[in-house]
Every structure is written in C-alpha cells, then in structure tokens.
Amino acid sequence: MMSSAQTMSFNPIGPDELEMIGKALQDELQRRALSRKSEEAEALAANLISAYQAGIRDDLGLSIVAGLS
C-alpha cells in the first residue's frame, strides 16, 4: 500500500487528459504538415506531456505550448 506522500506525487494522465494532449499534438502536426512518425512529432509530444505535468491543463495552454515547441 502506498503512503499518502507517494499517492500525492503519483498523478497519472487519464483518458480525458490524454485525449486533450493528443488533440493539441494532432492540431500542431497538421499545422506544420508533419508526420506522427517524425522526430519532430516525438519531441512535440514529449513537450506537451511535460507541460501537462508542469500544470498546463487546458486546451489553450497546450496549444500555445505546441506552437512554441
């Protein structure tokens, strides 16, 4: 059983959050005409996940991060 400190620090990305991150990724890939299989797409996905984990939890914020990445 996890202690309360471990539980608080463990914050998985759920299906709704994953969908929101995925939409921001897909929108930016389309804007840049990039393939999902490209290195740029992988870097962008990593940046979006990091931004989400850092507290950017809305569509607009993730779209801004995607555009700046």
Image: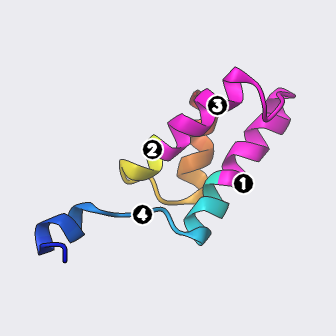
Q: CA distance from mark 3 to mark 4?
A: 20 Å
Q: Report the residue at 54% width, 42% height from top.
A: 48
Q: What element does badge 4 sit on?
A: loop
The disc label shown at residue 23, or none: 1
Q: Report the residue at 60% width, 70% height from top.
A: 16
Check disc 3 and report the residue beneath it.
Answer: 42
The disc label shown at residue 8, or none: none
Question: How many other residues sit within 10 Å of disc 1, few (<14), some (14-19) or many (≥20)?
Answer: some
From the image, state whether disc 1 or disc 4 is nearer to you.
4
Q: What element does badge 2 sit on?
A: helix
From the image, state whether disc 1 or disc 3 is nearer to you.
3
The disc label shown at residue 12, or none: 4
Q: Earlier in the sequence, mark 3 or mark 2?
A: 3
Q: Residue furthest top?
A: 39
**Residue 34 painted magenta:** yes
**Residue 46 painted magenta:** yes
Q: What element does badge 3 sit on?
A: helix
Q: Is residue 22 above or below residue 35?
A: below
Left or right relative to 43: residue 27: right
What secondary structure predominates along the stretch shown in magenta? helix
Give, as a three-letter code, the residue at label 2.
Ala
Magenta extent: 22-49
Question: How many other residues sit within 10 Å of disc 3, few (<14), some (14-19) or many (≥20)?
Answer: some
Q: CA distance from mark 2 to mark 4?
A: 14 Å
Give, as a three-letter code, the residue at label 4.
Pro
Check disc 2 and report the residue beneath it.
Answer: 51
Give, as a three-letter code, the residue at label 1.
Lys
